[in-house]
Image (cartoon, rainbow, N blue to C red):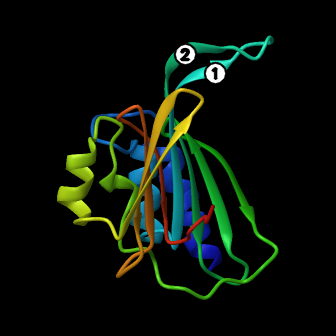
Amino acid sequence: MTKRIALAAALVLLAGCGDEGGSLSRTQRAFLEARGAPTAFAILFSDADLDESGLAVATPARRVETWIYAGAPARRIVFDSGYFVDEVDLTADLDADPAAASPADFDPAMTRADVEAALGAPDRVEEQDLGGQALVMLRYDAPEVVSVAFLDGHLASVVAGMQVQP
């Protein structure tokens, strides 16, 4: 296991960061090559932040990701816009197969039609008003647990390999 961690660290240092095209950075592709697909992952797409007064203000587009890898202990890796941020051991062991979906499968420009073309028709569609914005959640239960959220028609988040219930 120590050799795998050292290899992954070397790949990260040699590969560099940033986006060279596609939905993942060189660093993220190096992680996938070294460790395989994560057991679960969450991606948040954002182009706004809250200012000091609590109002939303436009910011450069960001893609914030958390990848979970099974093991004893399980590991959590965080990326922000393709750049490696953090890797920590979790307090619990996790014995599970990698997710069939991959973080590389999702791009911020994807539409609902693109997601349905890739994953098929969702098992459920949940729609609600979120402060004047239309939230549409596509839920896939089988064979893979995936939830894809759109806010006013724009891809907002993807959660795969785990499910958050309302």
Left or right: where 114 falls relative to 14? left
Left or right: where 25 falls relative to 162? left
Figure check: 87 above or below 113: below
Figure check: 7 above or below 71: above
Any part of residue 17 in sight = no
Q: Position of residue 28 (x, y in %)?
A: 45, 50
Q: Check disc 1 and report its element: helix, strand or loop.
A: strand
Would you name the residue on which mark 1 appears?
A: 49
For this rendering, which residue is in front, 136 or 147?
Answer: 136
For this rendering, which residue is in front, 138 or 130?
Answer: 130
The residue at the point 61 percent across, 68 percent down is 5
Q: Position of residue 163 (x, y in %)?
A: 56, 68
Would you say the residues marked 1 and 2 are in contact, meaning their CB atoms lie under 8 Å apart?
yes
The residue at the point 17 percent across, 57 percent down is 117
Q: Residue furthest bottom?
A: 95
The residue at the point 65 percent across, 75 percent down is 2
Residue type at mark 2 is Thr
Residue type at mark 1 is Asp
For this rendering, which residue is in front, 142 or 126?
Answer: 126
Would you name the residue on which mark 2 appears?
A: 59
Location of the N terminus (image quadrant) = bottom right
Mark 2: give few (<14), some (14-19) or many (20+) Cα within 10 Å: few
Q: Position of residue 17 (x, y in %)?
A: 47, 37
Any part of residue 73 in sight = yes
How many numbered marks does the figure carry?
2
Q: Check disc 2 and report its element: helix, strand or loop.
A: strand
Figure check: 48 above or below 78: above
| C-alpha gap between disc 1 and disc 2 | 7 Å
**N-term-proximal mark, 1 vs 2:** 1
The residue at the point 78 percent across, 79 percent down is 92
